[in-house]
Amino acid sequence: MIRGISNLDPARSADCFSSSLSILGIILIVPAMRWESGQANMGLKELLLTKSISLRVVLTFRVVVSVLILLCLVTGFAIVMRWCGCEFPFWIYIFAATGYAIFLGLMGLLTVRISGSQTAGYLSSLGYWSLCEMKVITEKSLFWMFPVINGHVEIYKVIVLIAVDILSISIFLYLSNHY
């Protein structure tokens, strides 16, 4: 789908943030465990386990760097949208889009960690994203995680998104400890 980003109102800007930028979380965060997942890479896993730095630190570093890159890309996209005449609350939309992208990425990362399959991680995240895009999961649903609805920030959705992101990070760190 090709879409323009010029002169959008807050509702259309939110749609652009939620549908276009959320994919970045999947692309950047899901592959964080790529080298350690599966039996084919057992040699790399054994090598990392012999180092003085723990595997949890390595994986956490990869996720943190991915989130920082994601934040830079979302902020850059928001600057371009503002430059093209779009009207939206700048920092709120950046926070919402980044949190939603992190949610999608962590969903895939946890799936990779639990299943050991990179493909399953991508499919779980893209499956949720597709259900939202096809309006199977609607904005009124409890499972809708993007906190901007019709151009307005829903505070309870922000709280739920933050809680789910923190819970996902906690589960990931717990599972990374039990490698």
Image (cartoon, grey):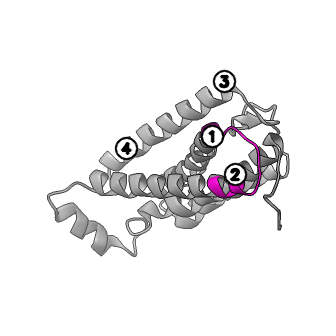
Which label's residue is closer to the chain start, 2 or 1?
Answer: 2
Q: Residues within 10 Å of mark 4 (few under 14, many from 20)?
A: some
The residue tagged 4 is 173
Looking at the rendering, in which quadrant would you find the N terminus? bottom right
Q: Secondary structure at mark 4?
A: helix
Work out how far the residue at label 2 is from the one at label 4, CA to CA, in angstroms: 37 Å
- Residue type (three-letter) at the residue carrying disc 1: Ala
Numbered disc in front, either 4 or 1: 1
Q: Rounded to the nearest whole Å, what is the CA distance between mark 4 and mark 1?
A: 23 Å
Which label lies toward us, 3 or 1?
A: 1
Mark nearer the N terminus (3 vs 4): 3
The amino acid type of the residue labelled 3 equals: Tyr
User: Residue 81: percent from the left, percent from the top?
Assistant: 71, 55
**What amino acid does circle 4 point to?**
Leu
The reply to whether residue 62 is in sight is yes
Give the alpha-carbon distance from disc 3 to disc 4, as whole Å.
26 Å
N-terminal of the two: label 2 or label 3?
2
- Callout 2: SS: helix
Q: Is residue 41 magenta?
A: no
Q: Mark 2 — residue? A: 82
Could you tell me which residue is drawn at 82 percent across and 36 percent down? 150
Residue 89, magenta (yes or no):
yes
- Density class for disc 1 (Cα within 10 Å; few <14, some 14-19, many ≥20) is many
Rendered image quadrant of residue 73: bottom right
Relative height, residue 60 to residue 152 (above, below): below
Q: CA distance from mark 3 to mark 1?
A: 12 Å
Q: Quadrant of residue 77?
A: bottom right
List the residue tagged with mark 1: 96
Please tell me which residue is depicted at 49% across the width and 35% down the height of the picture. 167
Left or right, 75 with respect to 116, comes to right
Q: Position of residue 8 (x, y in %)?
A: 82, 50
